[in-house]
Amino acid sequence: MPIPFQIKDLRTDLAEPSREAEFLRGLTASYRDIYVSILSIVGNHADAEDVLQEVCVVLWQRFDEFEPGTNFRKWACAFAFNMARFHARQQRRRKGLGLSDEALKELTHDQMGGGELFELRRELLRNCLARLKSKDRQFLMNCYSARTTLTEYAQKEEIPVATVYTRLKRIRSLLVGCINRSLGRGEGQL
């Protein structure tokens, strides 16, 4: 989901240490997660986009309540969940469609837990990436940061495409194993 043009236009000023720039950095980093959270509750893209616009306005209006240094994504998604649930309730009353309040509570509970697990796995991924051999980490960065396909990357590096895919599969497997071990035992090894 692309960020609305108004926010994109403002992204050039994100280097400033202003409160507005802080808000835009948090919103830009969390925008897709906020949208997905809303979509999981309201169920269709048009309604999700409408709710998302309302959420962005409310987030900005209430940004003085956000504590710097805490998790913006979690804070914003909490507003998004509540506003999406409210929207879903209204739709159910108006059209007789949608999930019951109990189902929405269950979905919200599951979504919040899933978001926390996702954040934990993201942090563990950072740790596991740091443990990779530098040549493997550099290979990953080259593959994923290039604005080319893996086939184009392989041609540029003059290596077989199959070699690129095989090496990526091996590195991904190492990372998944490291994350899973970290979740199970507290410390992952590569």
Image (cartoon, grey):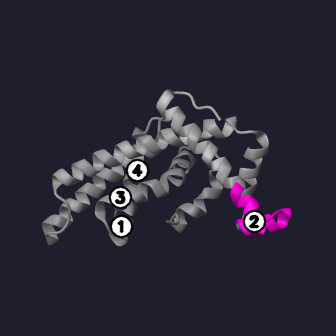
Q: Which residue is mark 3?
A: 38
Q: Secondary structure at mark 1?
A: helix
The residues bearing labels 4 and 1 have C-alpha atoms spaced at a distance of 14 Å
What is the spatial separation of the Cα atoms under label 2 and label 3, in whole angstroms?
A: 39 Å
Q: Are marks 1 and 2 in contact (CB under 8 Å)?
A: no
* Residue 47 falls within the magenta-colored stretch: no
Q: Identify the residue shown where x is 65% and y is 54%.
A: 169
Marks 4 and 2, how far apart in space?
45 Å
Q: Amino acid at mark 2?
A: Val
Question: How far from the left and from the top, in percent, is residue 172?
Answer: 63, 49
The residue at which mark 2 appears reads as 161
Hey, what amino acid is under mark 1? Asp
Instruction: Please determine whether, in this image, residue 74 is positioned above or below residue 36.
Output: above
Question: Looking at the image, is mark 1 or mark 2 nearer the viewer?
Answer: 2
Tag in front: 3 or 4 = 3
The nearer-to-camera label among 3 and 1 is 3
Mark whose residue sits in front, 4 or 2: 2
